[in-house]
Image: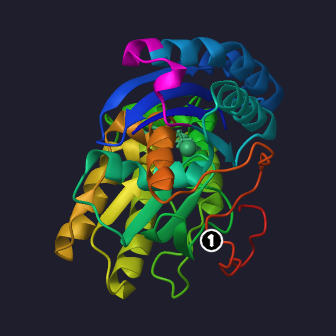
């Protein structure tokens, strides 16, 4: 089985060819950092235009590097949401055109589902159900991944996503954009206990996350002018990691039948986040799986792999499938207190 996957939901444009036996035959990626850097964040209109310009070349490149043509693939998979709607539409419509012209099935993939199965691309032994901490720029959730298309959301953020908190901290500290890797680099030379920062919701009975208060505390710490940038970055990262650990420990203690603790999404590329979560799994004698860094941040290999997972279940979509700005993995999940903004 060969799947061509496309990704365009935020600020990475990507195309990849992945085989059913887990070989990543090619994965091509074009970032837009330079386009968005002057604005300190992703500008949706600029992102959509850039996807439209980059995607055809990336598709051609991915097919060529894989040594295949469109006629050789079994289906075309594309992110159909959630994300910035202009960009999602560029990728989805491109996939529809390719599928239509080559007479191949279309597979629409939920971007979060792409992150959720990505550990199975690199870990053949990872079986459902597993506990997933999904940490990205737009989301911070704990999910039971029970099967293909079967998710139970256990927790979400009541305000900011953790990646958003990294990005805002970077902006506050003048570390540039994208923020996560910049904060991690600055933190490497700082003292993680130099600045007293809050750990929102730590130890509470409710399952959810919160990062808005932490971000505001970073702003106050900077304005106080008494701490160095590396110390504030390291202290922020320490507080964020402790929040992730506490909420994940709580969920893992209550999970009855999970095969593993898994972390995915852009923030899972962070070394402190990975090692702290690995310790949580080890303490409970549960296997731990984290994809390699390139597979944590947005890419098309995970979308192509989700296409493999879905096609195996016979799940394909019609050419009038909609692009969705909001698309929760578990539509039946109880809304979190104070939420209503984050799907
Ligand atoms: O999954 P992703 O690439 O895109 C979304 O679906 O949102 O995640 C991007 C997020 C950004 O907030 C970025 O700052 C964060 O992941 N990130 C990191 C690191 N690398 C990326 N956060 C902390 N440490 C990192 N090394
Ligand atoms: Zn993502």
Q: Is residue 196 visible?
A: no
Viewer-nearest residue: 195 or 251: 251
Q: Which residue is drawn at 37% across and 73% down?
A: 129
* Number of marks in the rendered image: 1
Where in the image, quadrant-wise, is ligand 2 located? top right
Q: Which residue is drawn at 48% across and 75% down?
A: 202
* Neighbour tally class for label 1: few under 14, some 14-19, many 20 plus, Cα within 10 Å: some
Percent coordinates x, y for residue 266 in the rendering? 48, 43
Q: Which residue is drawn at 74% across and 32% down?
A: 87
Viewer-nearest residue: 46 or 127: 127
Percent coordinates x, y for residue 85 in the rendering? 79, 40
Asked if residue 161 lies in the magenta stretch, the reply is: no
Q: Which quadrant of the figure has residue 128?
A: bottom left
Q: Which quadrant of the figure has residue 58?
A: top right
Residue range corresponding to the magenta coloring: 64-75
How are the colours assigned in the image?
A: rainbow
Q: Can residue 15 be seen in this view?
A: yes
Asked if residue 66 lies in the magenta stretch, the reply is: yes
| Pointer 1 residue | 330
């Amino acid at each position: 089985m060969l799947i061509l996957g496309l990704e365009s939901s935020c600020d990475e444009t990507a195309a990849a060819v992945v085989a059913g036996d887990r070989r990543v035959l090619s994965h091509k990626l074009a970032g837009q950092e330079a386009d968005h850097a002057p604005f300190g964040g992703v500008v949706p209109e600029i992102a959509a235009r850039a996807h439209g310009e980059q995607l055809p070349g990336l598709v051609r490149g991915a097919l060529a590097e894989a040594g295949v043509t469109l006629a050789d693939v079994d289906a075309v998979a594309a992110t159909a949401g959630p994300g910035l709607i202009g960009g999602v539409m560029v990728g989805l419509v491109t996939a529809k055109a390719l599928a239509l012209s080559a007479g191949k099935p279309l597979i629409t993939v939920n971007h979060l589902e792409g992150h959720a199965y990505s550990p199975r691309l690199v870990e053949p032994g990872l079986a459902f159900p597993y506990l997933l901490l999904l940490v990205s720029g737009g989301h911070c959730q704990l999910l039971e991944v029970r099967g293909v298309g079967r998710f139970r959301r256990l927790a979400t953020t009541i305000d900011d996503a953790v990646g958003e908190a990294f990005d805002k901290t970077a902006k506050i500290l003048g570390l540039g954009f994208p923020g996560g890797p910049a904060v991690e680099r600055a933190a490497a030379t700082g003292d993680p206990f130099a600045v007293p920062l809050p750990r929102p919701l730590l130890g509470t009975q409710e399952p959810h996350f919160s990062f808005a208060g932490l971000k505001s505390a970073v702003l106050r710490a900077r304005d106080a002018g008494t701490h160095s940038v590396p110390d504030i970055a390291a202290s922020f990262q320490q507080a964020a990691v402790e929040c992730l650990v506490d909420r994940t420990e709580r969920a893992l203690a209550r999970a009855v039948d999970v095969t593993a603790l898994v972390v995915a999404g852009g923030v899972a590329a962070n070394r402190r986040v990975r090692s702290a979560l690995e310790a949580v799994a080890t303490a409970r004698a549960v296997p731990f799986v984290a994809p390699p860094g390139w597979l944590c941040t947005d890419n098309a290999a995970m979308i192509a792999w989700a296409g493999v997972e879905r096609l195996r279940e016979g799940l394909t979509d019609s050419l009038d499938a909609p692009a969705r700005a909001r698309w929760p993995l578990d539509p039946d999940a109880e809304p979190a207190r104070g939420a209503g903004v984050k799907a």
